[in-house]
Amino acid sequence: MSRISQDNAVAGSRLTRALIYTVLIFFVIYYLLPLYVMVANSFKPLDEIRGGDLMALPNVWTLEPWRDAWSNAQIGVEATGLKPYFMNSFMIVIPAVTLSTIVGALNGYVLTKWQFKGHGTVFAMLLLSCFIPFQIVLIPAAKVLGFLGISGTIQGLILIHFVYGIGFSTLFFRNYYAAFPTELIRAAQIDGASFMQIFMRILLPSSGPIIVVTVIWQFTNQWNDFLFGASFSGFDSTPMTVALNNLVNSSTGVKEYNVHFAGAIMAALPTLFVYIVSGRYFVRGLMAGAVKG
Amino acid sequence: MASLTIENLKKSYGSVEVLKGIDIEIEDGGFLVLVGPSGCGKSTLLNTIAGLEEITSGDIKIGPESVAGLHPSQRDIAMVFQSYALYPNMTVAQNISFGMEIRKIDKAVREEAINKVADTLQIRELLHRKPSQLSGGQRQRVAMGRALVRDPQVFLFDEPLSNLDAKLRVDMRTEIKRLHKRMGTTIVYVTHDQIEALTLATKIAVLKDGYLQQFGTPDDIYNNPTNMFVAEFMGSPSMNLLTAQVVDQDGLKVQLSDTESTPILLPVDDTPAMRSCVGKQVIFGIRPEALTDPEGADRTAQNVVEAECLIEVVEPAGSDTFAVTKLGGKEVIARLRADAQVVPETYTTLSFNMAKAVFFDPDSQLRIR
Amino acid sequence: MKFLIQRWIPRLVLAPSFLLVVLFVYGFILYTGYLSMTDSKMLPSYGWVGFENYSRLFGLRHWNTAVTNLAIFGILYIGISSALGLFLAILLDQKIRAEGFIRPIYLYPMALSFIVTGTAWKWFLDPGIGIENTMHAWGWASFHFDWIKNRDYAIYTVVMAAVWQSSGFVMAMFLAGLRGVDNEIIKAAQIDGASGVTIYRRIIIPMMRPVFLSAFVVLAHLAIKAYDLVIALTGGGPGRATELPATFMYSYTFTRNQMGVGASSAIIMLIMIFSIIVPYVYSELKSGDQQ
């Protein structure tokens, strides 16, 4: 909104501006190139890729690689395509995102508006849990999942994603609610509203943006997870990322690059879709995750 | 030091015109205050003088020479910003001397200049601190130091006191006035605070919607406003503006009437302009201090009239007592002595200093002289 | 009575999260720490061996490769991403008309999973079908680029893919920082006669210190955890040339059945991350409290 004079730019000269645009466009190409390569080659027959020129558009356009990747490709032992794994990912991510967002919202509410002795320590512990290398919990987590009888199941992965998502959700909501006027809570208390009524009637209606940010952040992180999927999924609970990696890195058979590319795009589509639809909130989540306090 | 001349200055952003032909001239050593409500164009005007924004047409001269088109650093000006705009990563001393450093002035010369300014503003002990370690008032001083050290032809101040608390603001105001007296440099000062304008300026320019409403001395602006906007904007509490009827009954008079009480008739100077309004409605403007209790009335005033008014609310304010009454159907504020005995809901005699009254045309909003 | 319940409800609401985190994070860390001092192989076992696993770990050539790789990868990844991010942010801050179009393109890789990024770059850099082959097809017969297959250079291809993925995000952080600079400071510098380049060099970039710090913390944290990218891009190879601590831990624990050593490597990773994160979070929380 602030108006800056033209002089703030490094230089007003046309040559400089042309140079700036050239560099910017060069990087547009740099960032788009891998995506372009994936898309273009996912529509090519295999011979055409082997024949060279990964950059060229297909001579013969074909949907075959997409069909293969979706429903025929050999992943692990069975030729099921990526379809069941795509579904698995949704079945894991949707409940885990929902749970961790709800719990994060309640935690943020308590930690800002109902502070008690020791709330700072609790928050610090939740916050620090966002940054642990997950390798450190793999062995005991496998044991606990086994103890609960849900190892190798969708439920097991939901639990894991939910638990390790609490930290970031709480962080987001806490920082958002910290800026929410406490007078409103006091006023509602004087009006006789209870703990839950205040949350439902006063905080929640104005939490739209932060809910979107949290859901996007959790969805992206959990959809893109590989480590937990690779460690804790069983035969019929393998998520998309793990299946894609199995497809690409399986040592048997011919390397079907076009199918790999089609599969990679499939794995990327849900998060790309979210990014394109609500990029602003995506960036806000990244920033909030980076800048604490 | 130099005079500053602004000639038919226009500035637009695309199709939006923010300054619509401004003409101002301030003499060498003058203190020009640009005042107006937010969005009136006063800050844009200051920025064009500084060279921070280009002008669309017209001219700006510092001394005899046009500076339009020159880079800010070549205009021989210095500026103090509302947010102080201190470089956060530099110490106070570095902040003050950054401009000299850019111009590659010798370190010894720089040191001397820093010390001189530090003594003037009494900020010697702050020189090695970072801006984040300073209080608001100290930052204000450093910002002024950075401007002073340039020893410019013209000082520009962009609402420099608006971020200070009330007490500090009054102190700094006095200090700026003292500094101006001592150095005699031409100053252009933007504010939305009309008290600051009246106390500091040698000349005030009142702006609204990109037009210059009035340009004159503080006395002129306060006592002889050219239109209703200037009359209402300057002064606090602001001037009472009431609808009145001009009548000719034993001399020229204005008649204030509301539904309940008997009309009040106030004699006015018999000028051709007023005479031509007989039988018409005019806007009668009277400042609160010209409407007072008979004991507090100005004894040297020529044309004082008394009338009975029904007091609605009384607001003691320490040094004065404000009384709210109703005249011509509108709320009116009268400024009485501190210990004037007035009781709400009763009739009290108020005296109108008609020599101070002003009249406006209700349609054009311009002064009737 | 009602009052008492109201008093305890907040704590009751927070309690489950607190207990879960205490168990799943801090309890698990303690358990892994304990395992790292036992003779666990394929399954956890509780024979106490003290720091033996750690001394074995630091004697392992693979671990040393992994740590060296992490150092190379971390320095280049953080350095290049920050420099490129700042550079692009400054260019985009020059009133670029197409900013709304360019910015999302720079940032979209951050929405992809490392597995997707790894797959794309794996084939793009593959000498058989990727860029080398393409250059040959375009008639540049002598073009040679097989870093991904080369033991000495493969780690740099991991850097390339990681920079591609994260630099747009760093750009966005810096852009937000640049947009937050008080306009009046720039005006003041102009009046002081500073040129555009000087304004950036002397005033604006030094003001970006907090952004540099945030970017460093985020990137360092990503670098230490980087597992998926290596798996998808090189699988740790060729040989073990692109092994990182994260992949080392996984393979020692789950495929080589050296759980004790794996657990000790996980503890080392935790120490690395916390030595960066804890001071940062602490100072952020402290400055947050002061405001």
Image: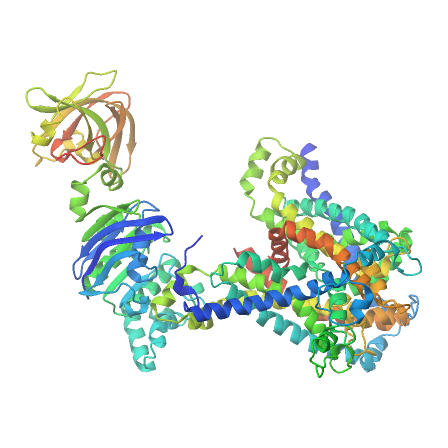
What residue is rendered at 37% in x and 60% in y?
A: B84
Q: Quadrant of residue A267?
A: bottom right
Query: What colour scheme was applied to this rendering of the protein?
Result: rainbow
Quarter of the image with the C terminus of chain B is: top left
Q: Up-down: is A145 above or below A185?
A: below
Whole-percent x, y for residue B247 in the image: 12, 21
Side of B5 relative to B135 (left or right): left
Specify the farthest residue to the front: A59
Q: Quadrant of residue C111?
A: bottom right
Residue B107 seen: yes
Quarter of the image with the N terminus of chain B is: bottom left
What residue is rendered at 64% in x and 65% in y?
A: A31
The answer to which of B367 and B152 lies nearer the viewer is B367
The answer to which of B261 and C3 lies nearer the viewer is B261
Side of C100 relative to B346 (left or right): right
Side of B337 relative to C196 (left or right): left
Whole-percent x, y for residue C175 in the image: 53, 62
Q: Quadrant of residue C56?
A: bottom right
What residue is rendered at 18% in x and 65% in y?
A: B63
Q: Up-down: is C235 above or below B264?
A: below
Residue C263 seen: no
Whole-percent x, y for residue B105 in the image: 32, 79
Whole-percent x, y for residue A147 in the image: 91, 54
Task: Count every numbered label the image shows and give the total.
Answer: 0
The answer to which of C179 and B67 lies nearer the viewer is B67
